[in-house]
Amino acid sequence: MTNNYPWLYDCLAAKPGAHSDFKAEWGWTRYMLDGKLFAAVCKNEAGEDYIVTLKLEPTEGELLRATFPSVFPGYYMDKRHWNSVYLDGTLPEYILRDVCEKSYRLILAKLPKKRRREILGEG
């Protein structure tokens, strides 16, 4: 399967304060904020990117799953808060971009207020 969202890595890496690493044993490129995961791009057995896993509010995740067959409960994650998306191009780009931002914002919101301001360059 080809990753039909070539902008995905750059989009996730560009989030303020984000850092990434590759967990070879899992086949995941993890994107984290202060050590807390907000996204994981997962490879299949052929070494190709095939899903991204992102955090969402449960009701929004349920709605996306019901609307788009390419969205399903989080791969190897809590099925209530985490959702995976096949990178086959069937999910509209603007929705995937929005979900990436929301996942990041959910993790950012859990950080102490002082740390959030530091990350966002607000003092």
Image (tube, helix red, strand yellow):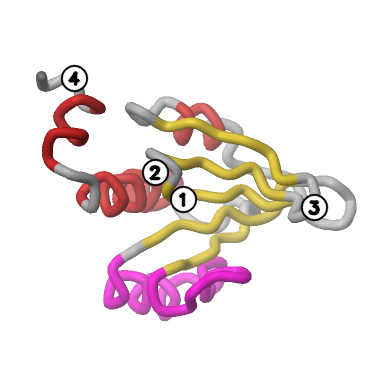
Real-space Cα separation, disc 2 to disc 1, in angstroms: 17 Å
* Residue 79 included in the magenta stretch of the image: yes
Q: Position of residue 51 (x, y in %)?
A: 63, 56
Give the residue number, with chain letter if any, for mark 2: 97
Q: Which residue is mark 1?
A: 37
Q: Residues within 10 Å of mark 4 (few under 14, many from 20)?
A: few
Residue that numbered label 4 is attached to: 121
Determine whether label 1 and label 3 are within 8 Å by CB.
no
Q: Is residue 87 above or below residue 13?
A: below
Q: Secondary structure at mark 2?
A: helix
Residue type of the residue flagged with mark 1: Leu
Earlier-in-chain disc, 4 versus 3: 3
- Indicate which disc residue 25 carries: 3
Residue 90, compared with residue 6, is above or below; it is below
Q: Is residue 56 magenta?
A: no
Residue 52 — which label?
A: none
The amino acid at mark 4 is: Gly
Question: N-terminal of the two: label 4 or label 2?
Answer: 2
Question: Which numbered disc, 1 or 4, marks the residue that appears first in the sequence?
Answer: 1
Q: Secondary structure at mark 3?
A: loop
**Front position in the image: 38 or 123:** 123
Residue 123 placement (x, y as % from top left): 10, 19
Residue at the image position 46 percent from the left and 57 percent from the top: 54
Are discs 3 and 2 less than 8 Å apart at CB?
Answer: no
Q: Residue at x 35, y 52 (%)?
A: 103
The magenta stretch is 57-81
Look at the numbered disc 4 and give the secondary structure of its residue.
Answer: loop
The foreground one among 34 and 55 is 34
Q: Amino acid at mark 2?
A: Arg
| Measured Cα–Cα span from mark 1 to mark 4 | 21 Å
Q: Nearer the viewer, residue 9 or 71?
A: 9
